[in-house]
Amino acid sequence: MSTQQRFTQALLSAEQTFPAGLFCHPDAESRFAVYRNNVFSSLTSALADSYPVVAQLVGAEFFAFMARVFIQTFPPCSPVLVNYGNAFADFIDTFSPAASLPYLADMARLERLRVEAYHAADFPGVGFEALSRFLEYPEQLHSLHLKLHPGTGVLCSSRAVFSLWAAHQGQGELAEVDPNHAEHLLVLRDALNVEVLLLSKACALFIQALQGGAGFGDAVCAALEEDNAFDAGPALALLIQKNLIIHAGLSEAS
Amino acid sequence: MSQYDINTPRSTRAVTHGLPARAGLGLKPDYFQPLAKGCDDLGFIEIHAENYMVAGGPFHYYLERLCEHYALSIHGVGMSIGAEGALDTEHLQRLNVLLARYQPASFSEHLAWSTHGPCFLNDLLPLQYDQQTLNRVCEHIDQVQNTLGRRMLLENPATYLQFNASTFDEPTFIREVVRRTGCGMLLDVCNVYVSCINHQWSTQEYLQALPLHETAEIHLAGFSEAFDRNGQRLLIDSHSAPVAAAIWSLYQQILEHTGPVATLIERDNELPGLAVLLAEARRAQAYLDNHGVQP
C-alpha cells in the first residue's frame, strides 16, 4: 500500500487508526490528529455553510456527528466543494439517529436547491412582450414550450419544510408550525437573490412538468389532475415576474 | 527545466505582469459589496480558484466588478500537485477556463497533496521529500504550466509531521522544484514559522536555503497554538487569527532580501469586519513602502 493510500485510509477510518512507522516524531499520533481534525472540521464547515437550517434544527454537536459519518461514507470526489453534499439529503433519510426528525431530509433538499440556485448560470428572462405573441393565440398556447432558468427548483414535501425554513429566517413562529402538514415550494434566483416561495401542489406540478420538458398544455393538464380549479394565469405571471422563463417557443428548446 | 516557456505558443499565453508590489486581501463573500466600490488600501485581491468554478450568480457578478478596481490573484487549493496519482485533468481544464475568463496577474498552488484516488480530502497534506516525489512534483508543475501557458507560483506548506523516508529538507526540496520547473515562489511567512516551530528547525537556516529571489508573492496570516502529547509547541496554520507579532518581524526581515513583493493578508476563518483586515493591509503596505525597514 502506498504512503498516501495509508495516510488517506487512516484519515477517514471510523476507528481513527494511525499509519505508524511513517513519521519521525515521538508523538506522531497527536500530530496526525491535526490533519484528521482539519479534514473533518473543514468539510463539516462546508456542509454547515450549505445546510444552515439543518444544522440549526439538530444543533452543532449532532450536526458534527452526522457530518462525520457522512464524510466517512461519502468523502468528496471533487475539489469543487460547492457540489459536495448532493447526496446529503438521501443520506439523512437513512441515518437512523435522525429518524425522530422526519422533515430533516427534505430541509436538506430545500437547502441544496438554494445552493444550486445561488450558483446557477445567468440567463435573462424573456419578459412579457416576448411571450405576449404566443398568449394572443390560444390555439398555439397548448404547444408552447417554456424553458425555465437553471436555478429554478421545485420541492414537494409531505412535511412543512417551507414553514420550518421560514421560521428560521424570522418569518413566523416555529412553535406554531405543524411539521406533518405537506408543503410545496419553489426555489428561484431573481437577479442575485435566491427566494423560496410557497406553492399550491397543483402549481408545483405545473412548474415541474414545464421543467421536465412538457408543453404548456400538458403542464396545465398535470396541474388540473391535482386540482380541477387550477388557474394557469397566476402561475404564468409568477414565472414572468421572477424572470424564470428564459426561452419560449413552439417546440422544446434544445 | 520546464518546457512551458519553450513550447507554448506566445499567442496562447496570458499577458501578465505579475501582481503589484502592494498589500492585498483574500476575497470573501462578506466583503463583496464594500470592496466593489474600490478601496485605496488594496492593490490586489485573491480568490480560491475552486470557489469560482460555478456557472454564474453573485460570485462571478461581484468578481467581474472587483476586477475593475484591483489586480487579481487566483490561488488554487485543490490541484493536489504532490499526489501520487496523475493530476485531475478535468480539474485542470476547469482552472484553465477560469484563468482564461479572468486573466489574473498571478496563479498559485501548494506544495501538498489533497486527493487520493477519487477522494478529495480538503486539506493540504504533507509530502515525503525524496527523489521520486521531487520528480513527480516537477512533472505535475510542468503539466500545469504547459496547460495554463503561464508560470505558476508554488506555496511552501505548513506541516505537522515529517516522514522518516525524506531525504531532502523542505527548503532544499522547494529550491530544487523552483530550479527545475521555473515556477515562482509564493512565500507564506506564517507557514515558514509554523513548520520551523513544529519541527524545531531554524527559521534563519530555512530562509537561507530558499530561493528568496524567486518570491513573487507573500502570504501573512495568524496561527493557533497547541501542544503535542510530549508537551512540544504545535502551531496550527488556522487562518483564523490576526497576523502574529512573530510573523510581522519575520516579514520585515524577508523584505530586506526580496524587496517589495505583493503581500496578502490571509484570513479564511472567524472573519472579522473588513476594517480589521484593511488595517492589517495598511500595516503590510507601510512595510512595503519602507522596503522592510520598520515604519
Image (cartoon, coloured by chain):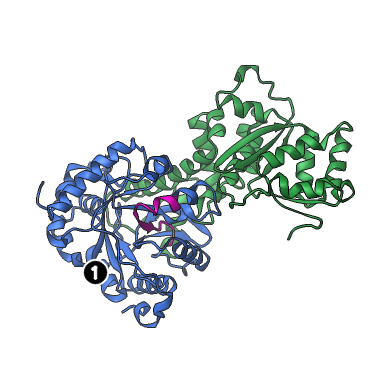
Q: Quadrant of the C terminus of chain A?
A: bottom right
Nearer to the camera, A64 or B11:
B11
Which residue occupies 28% across, 52% down? B43
On the image, the x and y values in percent for residue B100 come to: 46, 65
Q: Is residue A175 magenta?
A: no
Question: Which segment is the magenta one?
Answer: B63-80
Work out whether B149 lies above or below B18. Answer: below
Q: Secondary structure at mark 1?
A: helix
Which residue corresponds to mark 1? B175
Q: Position of residue A243 (x, y in %)?
A: 66, 44
The residue under label 1 is which amino acid type? Arg
In the displayed structure image, the side of residue A49 where residue B13 appears, left or right = left
Q: Which residue does the image show at 29% across and 76% down from the upper left?
A: B180
In the image, residue B67 lies in the stretch drawn in magenta = yes
Please say whether residue B202 is visible from this viewpoint: no
Vertical placement of residue B12 versus A127, above or below: below
| Image coordinates for residue A93, horizontal then vertical, percent | 66, 38
Q: Which chain is green?
A: A
Question: Which chain can be seen in blue?
Answer: B
The picture quadrant where one finds residue A66 is top right
Foreground of the two, A132 or A188 = A132
Whether residue B136 sits left or right of residue A137 in the image: it is left
Using a 10 Å C-alpha cutoff, classify the residue at mark 1 as few (fewer than 14 neighbours), some (14 to 19) or many (20 or more): some
